[in-house]
Image: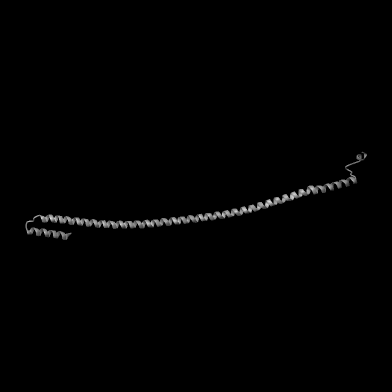
Amino acid sequence: MIYLAEFSVIRPEWGLLLWSTVIFLLFWALVGKFAFGPIRDALKKREGDIQDALDEAKNAREEMANLKAENEQILAQAREERSNILKEAKAAKDSIVNEAKTKAKEESQRIVANAKAEIETQKTAAILEVKNQAGMMALSIAEKIIKKQLTGDSEQEKFANSLVDEIKLN
């Protein structure tokens, strides 16, 4: 115990310093091999994983930007196609409407022409009917007059001359 009484931490001895250094270096080598090596490897692996994740995120951002640009291009094409389809549909509608108007106009002109021809035919038929009826009436009147006995040849001549004058006037 005497040996411990003389021990002072402030004033180390060479043997204690040597053994403390040897134990510390041995401890440092063991900790370095079994603790710091795996910790360093884990940190390097984690750093690599983080870098890979950052690279993947960067690639994903670039891919998303490319997809967004591609989507915008597809939307622009779709809008252009929609615009072209609407223009074509409007042109087709206008063409169909104009064609229908033209056909309707031609049909109405044909119907009017047919109606005018029918009216002329009916008019001619009516005039012919009136003439026939007038002729029948004239024959009927002439028959009745002939049946009537006229007194004398001078009266018959006067009557015939008046009928001839009437016919010349018509």
- Residue 148 against residue 27 in the figure, above or below: below
Where is the N terminus found, in terms of image quarters?
top right
Picture quadrant where residue 147 is located: bottom left
Residue drawn at x 13%, y 59% as measured from the top left: 163
Picture quadrant where residue 137 is located: bottom left
Expressed as whole percent of the image width and height from the top left, the position of residue 73 reads 56, 55
Name of the residue lying farthest toward the right: 2
Expressed as whole percent of the image width and height from the top left, the position of residue 30 reads 82, 48
- Residue 49 against residue 162 in the figure, above or below: above
Q: Is residue 76 left or right of residue 120?
A: right
Name of the residue lying farthest toward the left: 152
Expressed as whole percent of the image width and height from the top left, the position of residue 32 reads 80, 48
Residue drawn at x 16%, y 59% as measured from the top left: 167
Where is the C terminus found, in terms of image quarters?
bottom left
Expressed as whole percent of the image width and height from the top left, the position of residue 103 reads 38, 57
Q: Is residue 66 left or right of residue 93?
A: right
Residue drawn at x 62%, y 54% as measured from the top left: 63
Residue drawn at x 69%, y 52% as measured from the top left: 52
Q: Is residue 64 left or right of residue 162?
A: right
